[in-house]
């Protein structure tokens, strides 16, 4: 998808005079066909589709997700409307379907996705039932019943200055756009930084690049092998790429908040875990490539975990943790593309170790890498810097830098969540 071209078309729509000039140069056919140009299948939110009067090809009522086929101009309208409603991009382009795919093929694909949604919702339902059944049986809650000393001690080790150093380390690259050499360099340097950070660890760990077919950028994976159940895996990750989506101005994409912050949180959690005792289950830390290109790296990683039959017991996604839009220590937590049992675990982590405010909210579509795992049937969680309405407005521009409105105290909460999440699930 060529965002610049789409933005230019949107601009052209807003400036009829510009179009008139264009017609003078006899590109009028192209302009009048704009409605048909670049039609692609996308998944979006029912309320957005209704508002914009898009014809829906398939609906999933329980999640309010719909399949639509949209031209570039319509996708711009959708992005614009989503922005008005303080959502992010508002849709997910189905990259698996070629532009010339038929409606029948698209419906088949969407049916597959909706089936996984149903299976995930069924798991939520079963979780509610068995939890209350167990409660009745033994008179105890099934979530951790109180704080553990080892976890309290571990989360106290989260260092704000480590987070700041890592965010600045990543944000100094001109861009981490997944198609660029700068992104390649950032990933190579970050792998070295992980290795340096873990050099005193005595646990069995490996750090690898994961190459992809959908993006030239590599993801990075750090694996710490479990001592008791090495086949069972707990995942914590965030995307390491960035993007600049503005039409004018520089192409710089420091991506301090989106998502050097989450990447730094993952590294800080890894440092603390790697310097502790060996977990029972295997832990995988990911720094995903090409998220901004459409969840590219994580889509390949989660699909291959599914086809290899891997037992992934929980996935935590950290994407944007630096801007306390609702005030410090007031976090959002996405309820779509995430699992009830994981959100319950977050509530228990908050109760036992953090005592902050967590406000449930929605992206409205698969807005980050957790959606890749969720669509492949794995349980996911995505705490977020604020509610959607109050999120950082500078993301995807050259202004996404460390500034006076950044809070590493706020961001530190997410590494604490990651450490508690890992120690609760992997120990
Ligand atoms: N960090 C954003 C997602 C996000 C933004 C979540 C604001 C919550 C609030 C992510 O990197 C992103 O930009 N995602 C894209 C979608 C993706 C499929 C390309 C988006 O939201 O447009
Ligand atoms: Zn982004």
Image (cartoon, helix red, strand yellow):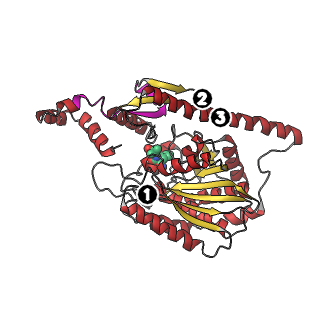
Q: Which residue does the numbered mark 3 point to in the structure image?
A: 119
Q: Which residue does the numbered mark 1 point to in the structure image?
A: 217
Q: Position of residue 102 (x, y in %)?
A: 42, 28
Q: Nearer the viewer, residue 377 or 13?
A: 377
- The range drawn in magenta is 31-52
Give the residue displayed 36% in from the left and 52% down from the top.
244
Whether ligand 1 has any atom under 8 Å from the Cβ at mark 2 is answered as no
Q: Quadrant of the N terminus?
A: top left
Question: Is residue 164 visible in this depiction of the protein?
Answer: yes
* Magenta span includes 61: no
Question: Is residue 392 visible in this depiction of the protein?
Answer: no
Which of labels 2 and 1 is toward the front?
1
How far is disc 2 from disc 3 in space, using C-alphas? 12 Å
Sequence-first disc among 1 and 3: 3
Q: Which residue does the numbered mark 2 point to in the structure image?
A: 62
The outermost residue toward the front is 308
Residue 201's place in the image compared with 33, above or below, is below
For label 2, the SS is loop
How far is disc 1 from disc 3 in space, using C-alphas? 32 Å
Which of labels 2 and 3 is toward the front?
3
Sequence-first disc among 2 and 3: 2
Q: Nearer the viewer, residue 309 or 294?
A: 309
Give the residue displayed 70% in from the left and 48% down from the top.
345
């Amino acid at each position: 998808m060529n965002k610049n071209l789409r933005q230019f078309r949107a601009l052209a729509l807003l400036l009829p005079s510009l179009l008139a000039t264009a017609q003078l140069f006899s590109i009028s056919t192209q302009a009048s066909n704009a409605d048909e140009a670049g039609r692609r299948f996308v998944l979006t939110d029912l309320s957005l589709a209704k508002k914009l009067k898009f014809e829906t090809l398939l609906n999933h009522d329980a999640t309010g997700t719909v399949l639509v086929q949209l031209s570039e101009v319509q996708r711009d309208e959708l992005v614009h409307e989503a922005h008005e409603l303080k959502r992010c991009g508002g849709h997910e382009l189905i990259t698996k379907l070629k532009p010339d795919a038929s409606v029948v093929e698209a419906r088949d694909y969407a049916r597959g996705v909706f089936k996984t949604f149903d299976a995930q919702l069924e798991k939520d339902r079963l979780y509610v039932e068995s939890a209350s059944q167990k409660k009745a049986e033994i008179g105890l809650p099934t979530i951790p019943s109180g704080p553990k000393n080892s976890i309290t001690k571990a989360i106290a080790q989260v260092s704000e200055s480590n987070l700041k150093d890592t965010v600045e380390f990543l944000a100094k690259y001109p861009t981490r756009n997944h198609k660029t050499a700068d992104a390649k360099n950032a990933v190579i340097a970050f792998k070295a930084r992980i290795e340096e950070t873990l050099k005193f660890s005595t646990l069995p760990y490996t750090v690898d690049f994961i190459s992809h077919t959908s993006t030239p950028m590599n993801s990075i994976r750090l694996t710490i092998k479990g001592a008791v159940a090495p086949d069972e895996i707990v995942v914590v990750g965030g995307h390491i790429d960035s993007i600049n989506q503005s039409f004018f101005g520089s192409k710089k994409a420091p991506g301090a908040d989106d998502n050097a912050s989450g990447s730094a949180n993952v590294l800080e959690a890894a440092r603390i875990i790697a310097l502790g005792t060996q977990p029972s289950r295997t832990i995988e830390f990911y720094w995903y490539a090409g998220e901004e290109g459409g969840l590219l790296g994580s889509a390949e990683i989660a699909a291959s975990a599914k086809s290899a039959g891997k037992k992934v017991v929980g996935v935590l996604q950290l994407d944007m943790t630096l801007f306390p839009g609702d005030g410090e220590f007031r976090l959002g937590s996405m309820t779509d593309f995430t699992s009830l049992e994981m959100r319950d675990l977050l509530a228990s982590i908050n109760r036992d170790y953090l005592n902050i405010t967590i406000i449930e909210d929605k992206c409205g579509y698969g807005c980050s890498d957790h959606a890749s795992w969720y669509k492949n049937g794995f349980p996911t969680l995505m705490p977020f810097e604020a509610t959607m309405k109050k999120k950082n407005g500078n993301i995807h521009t050259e202004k996404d830098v460390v500034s006076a409105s950044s809070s590493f105290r706020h961001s530190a909460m997410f590494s604490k969540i990651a450490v508690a999440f890992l120690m609760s699930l992997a120990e």
